Amino acid sequence: MELIEVRNLTKKYGSLKALDKVDMNIPEGRIIGLLGKNGAGKSTLMRCILGFLKFDGEIDIMGERVDHHKESIHNLIAFIPDVSSLDDRLTVQQTIDYVASLNESWNAVTAGRLLSRSDLPLNQKVGNLSKGMKTKLYLLITLSINVKILLLDEPTLGLDIVFRKEFFNTIIGEYFDETKTIIISTHQVEEVEQILQDIIFIDEGKIILQEDIAELKNQYSLISVPTDRKEELEKLNPILITHTLGKVNAIVGSDVKIEGAEYSRPSLSDLFVAKVGGSNE
Amino acid sequence: MNKFKTLIRKDWIISKKTLLMPFWITAGFYLLIILGTVIAYYKGDVQGNLFDFPTDIPINAISYIANLSVVGLPGLMSIIFTIMLMQGALNEDIRRNCELFHRSQPVSIWLRTGSKFYVGLLGNWIVLFLITLFTFIVINIILAIIHQFNFYVAISGMLQALTAFIKTGLIVGSFTFFCSAIFKDKAFLKGLSIIVAVHFLFLIFNSLFGWKLPLPLTYLLKLVTIDTGQRILVGIDEFEALNLIKNAWNSILFNWKTLYQVLFSGALFAGATLIYKNKEIK
């Protein structure tokens, strides 16, 4: 079953095309990574799905058409942007009460469990919390709402490694099951690579690739040989060549074999660079 | 309805400091008066004729005017704090980077703006009423001790002035609320500047070309003007004074201007909400 269907989605900022005729289907029960360079259109795509932006084209979420600022969409989809977007003027308790009262699908049992496991100071103003604490609070209020789709837009930006790990562990442990879908937009792809099932590469407002990660990796091999054998690799038409200490590596088709080479599976970031190209910054 | 209550509770929490400010200012004002009186008393500077009222004004009229005046300072404060609160109503969340969080909740935009409008206006009116009530009690205890006290006259004076300030607050607050949907900061000043600029532009066009373009500032000031009818009470007898006090309700509340004010305020609220709804969240 498709949870999100995007057809011919175009979004312009003046003369700049942020999204260009995007077609995309998001099935249920998947954890999907949305990868793109800065300004590729990741956040714009998410904000269009949430109805925060005006756009041309069609977006359906579980059969419901998304319009600009359609509040009923938020009964189906939860969103975590950068965790600093909580309201600093409310206390932790007030924030929890506020979200609980506005969301009919609020699950008090989940909220209680997450709260008991955290050390959140209930009477503290959100503005006085550390970024790690804000993350815990955002997770608590989001994961306690029973929605089918969770959108994460660079949620762990500025967090240390411990909180980043905890963030994704909590989401997988508390939220995900085969009926739900998570879309994660992040730069730190290495950290989420292990939990992702599908990947979407986006570049210059266009979807370059949408595929099952296991299938994608099965199509390619990472071959490593000593630096003096670089010419051999170049003859294989690799999609990417990189260098490490004393070695040269190439991503080639999985059926390509050369003698004396080391074989491994390419990482997502290597495949991304191969498909999309280097940084524009 | 429960969602609206939740929004009101949230808006009350984040507006509480500004809303309660007039209480502290009034408390400071009273403290200064008490302190000044005590110092003057010990220095022997208290005037003997402080409560000698003029003889050509009826006693009820004095009581009426005194109770009209009771609302003056809190009324002015109420309007200032309404502006302060309303000019951040629809842009403060954007400035504080929490707009995405609030907009991600399944709540109608009309409920969100309605709650902000409601708390900004009603909150200030409640504060105005409470401060006025306190001052009313103090003033009328003094009047009752040194003079004759007529509850009907006193309460009429207080309520009429209160109504006039509430109506002014409604227009000023709605105008500021509308401006907050357009401008990111200093919404009231920017909105007023545009009204003044358009006003003078139209004035120049009218005088140069003989046109009759409507002057926005004149219209706005007409809607904002407070009319309590207190100027007409000099040189009349007690009976006439009571009649005029009763009739003053017609010039303050029961007239077409009130209807215009309510409709104008409603139009500004609806306009502000539509502008806010139309904005993209980037």
Image (tube, rainbow, N blue to C red):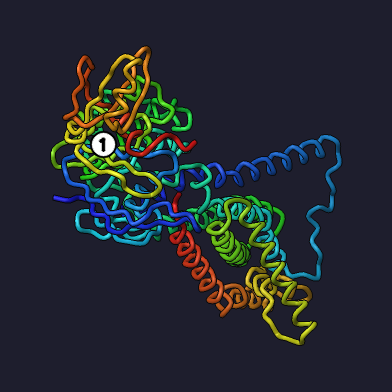
Identity of the residue drawn at 81% across and 71% down? B56
Q: Nearer the viewer, residue B25 or A196?
A: A196
Residue B194, position as x, y percentages in the image: 67, 64
Disc 1 residue type (three-letter): Leu
Give residue A73's quadrant in the image: bottom left
Q: Which residue is identified by label 1?
A: A143
In the drawing, does residue B54 fall left or right of residue B166?
A: right
Q: Nearer the viewer, residue B242 or B273?
A: B273
Which quarter shows the N terminus of chain B?
bottom left
In this picture, is A197 found above or below A117? below
In this picture, is A19 found above or below A190? below
Identity of the residue drawn at 71% across and 72% down? B199
- The count of marks equals 1
Q: Residues within 10 Å of mark 1 (few under 14, many from 20)?
A: many
Q: Nearer the viewer, residue B260 or A35?
A: A35
Is residue A174 at all visible to an observer of this figure? no
Chain to which mark 1 belongs: A
